[in-house]
Image: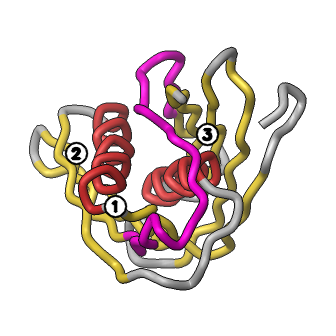
Amino acid sequence: MSEDTERTGRNATAEADDGADDSRWFELREHTADVAVAAAADSLAGVFAAVAEGLTAAMCDSIPTTGDRFEILARSESPEAALFDYLDDCIYERDVRGVLPVDHRATVRRDGEEWVVEATARGVPLADVTARDVKAVTYSEMELTEADDGWRAYVVFDV
């Protein structure tokens, strides 16, 4: 992406914490040598899925319809750590399975002292796409906040 380029994506339906439809969006933002995703959604689960969609957009401009759904499970001590671990698992799946995770769906819940992310994504074989490398998710400037109209997140990825 050029320095003045921003890409925005919208997905009108995302699985929310309670299984209901959830409005969500993301926007790619330049960040020094990295890329950042700003996202918002009606629910915590929706904002997790929106950030993951932003991660996908940072890696690929055009997404084919190929690929099968797979599951991701992350357990962490806080919502921010759960978001980090979920996104890290998406990158891990790309590296290990050789697929680009797309069409993200997530549920997020508290289970005792842990936060649990149960998610699915469609894994598009990397052979079917021209993908850019995103090396890692970072805690640098990470924000996850609840607002009057839902949830907001900001995540920086190392490219």
Task: Tell me if residue 154 comes above or below residue 26 in the rendering.
Answer: above
Q: Position of residue 57 (x, y in %)?
A: 63, 53
Q: Secondary structure at mark 3?
A: strand
Q: Is residue 130 magenta?
A: yes
Closest to the observer, 121 or 125: 125
- Cα separation between marks 2 and 3: 19 Å
Of mark 2 and mark 1, the one earlier in the sequence is 1
Q: Residues within 10 Å of mark 1 (few under 14, many from 20)?
A: some
* The magenta segment: 121-144
Q: Residues within 10 Å of mark 2 (few under 14, many from 20)?
A: some
Location of mark 2 (residue): 115
Location of mark 3 (residue): 147
Location of mark 1 (residue): 98
What's the residue at 49%, 84% (across, down)? 66
Of mark 2 and mark 3, the one earlier in the sequence is 2
Q: Position of residue 78 (x, y in %)?
A: 26, 33
Q: Is 133 left or right of 18, judged from the image as shown?
A: right
Of mark 3 and mark 1, the one earlier in the sequence is 1
